[in-house]
Amino acid sequence: MSKRVIQSNTRNNFTQIRSPVEVQSANLAVQVRSPVESPPQRIRVQDIQRERPNIPIFSSPKLISQVKSFTQYSDKHYYLGFGGLGDAILLMAVCWDNPKAKVVFFANQVSLIRSFFELLGISLYIHDNIMGTKIASHIFDYMKALPTFKQSAHLADGLDFGDWANSTKYIDRIRGRVNWIDHLGKHPSDMPVVIIAPSGSHKDISRQRFLHNGEYEWLVHRCLDKGYRVYVAGSMNDLHHFKLIDRENFYWLHSDKIYDGKGVAKDSSLLNMLRIINSAEHVYSMDTWLKTYTLTCGIPTTVIKTRWNGGYKLYGQDITDFIFLNHNIWPNLTLTKWEDLFATL
């Protein structure tokens, strides 16, 4: 079988679009198909196109008009959300099985988040994130006044995220367990699978939600040595940062490609990616969207605590802990310091 060097990766699932789109509701039943086999392609990490950030550009009057047009139907149930894919997963969990659901979401990663909503058949209006602008509060007030608006998931009252400290009412709104594994299916495997998510979307040492390269390599080798097939889930920027590990049963998992340790790539899909994740025996993750997905699916998940300038904060000193690391929501969560994981794994 011939192999070739890819000069660039022309498809980028993290590119954000500038204009809003509506995704029409689809049948909730996902038709699971085996991934199409394609010839393997050997790649060099330095040849993969890096992801570029997007700065939202929008017209407030046009945006308001489009949101009003999307929410004009009195027989639908409306939901609102802001943020990254982890935020979107919490919102999808409460509405994915509601055929009347229509979601307005202001997203950090428009393309990837849109793909998740499409996969679950949820009607969607999506736009670049406007949080922090006056128009965000205006749209919140408008939607909250709709007769069929659903105050759900972790959407903060008044968009005041400090209110998350009042966690009891948000626990009641969040659905901490959904049956996405049966709905989407599992990828067959002849050996136990471990998923590793070594980095959040940003690499900032002051709020370090990523492993150091040596820690990443140790964790991968440790899991391989214990007899697991290891999939590392991450973006193309993460792949540039962490690199492939040339060992049997190592794979880098992305929403449209899978790379083995030698750099041989196969085409994949978001559905296939989630089916592989669904097959995991255990997940080791930084505080990322992936851990929110696996916790929601009930997969045993160890989350490595965020380091703040090299140290750790007590639970609750970061307001997001009350939502995303709350054991009352996620009973299958193990929260650990890196040093403790290193000593016990």
Image: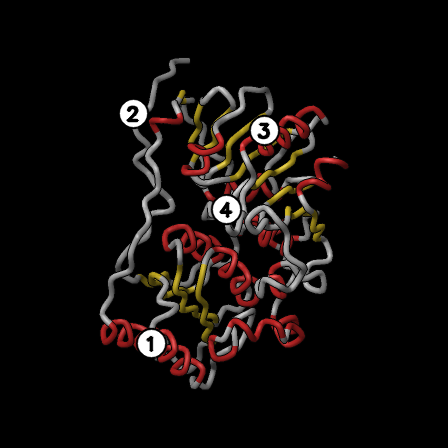
Circle 3/circle 2 CB separation < 8 Å: no
Give the left or right position of residue 258, taking residue 178 as reference.
left
Measure the alpha-carbon separation of dots 2 and 4. Answer: 32 Å
Q: Amino acid at mark 4?
A: Ile
Q: Quadrant of residue 63?
A: bottom left
Q: Nearer the viewer, residue 320 or 289?
A: 320
Residue that lies at the very extreme toward the top in this rendered image: 1
| Mark 3 or 2, closer to the camera | 3
Q: Is residue 340 above or below residue 170?
A: above
Q: Amino acid at mark 1?
A: Lys
Q: Secondary structure at mark 4?
A: loop
Q: Which residue is mark 4?
A: 205
- Label number found at residue 7: 2
The nearer-to-camera label among 4 and 3 is 4
Question: Under tag 2, what secondary structure?
Answer: loop
Element type at marker 1?
helix
Q: Which residue is mark 1?
A: 134
Name which residue type carries label 3. Answer: Glu
From the image, tell me which residue sits under label 3. Answer: 217
Distance from disc 2 to disc 1, alpha carbons, whole Å, reads 43 Å
Lower sequence index among marks 4 and 3: 4
Real-space Cα distance between discs 1 and 4? 30 Å
Residue at the right extreme of this rendering: 344
Residue 128 falls left or right of residue 294: left
- Mark closer to the observer (2, 4): 4
Of residues 133 and 114, the one nearer the viewer is 133
Which is nearer the N-term, disc 1 or disc 3? 1
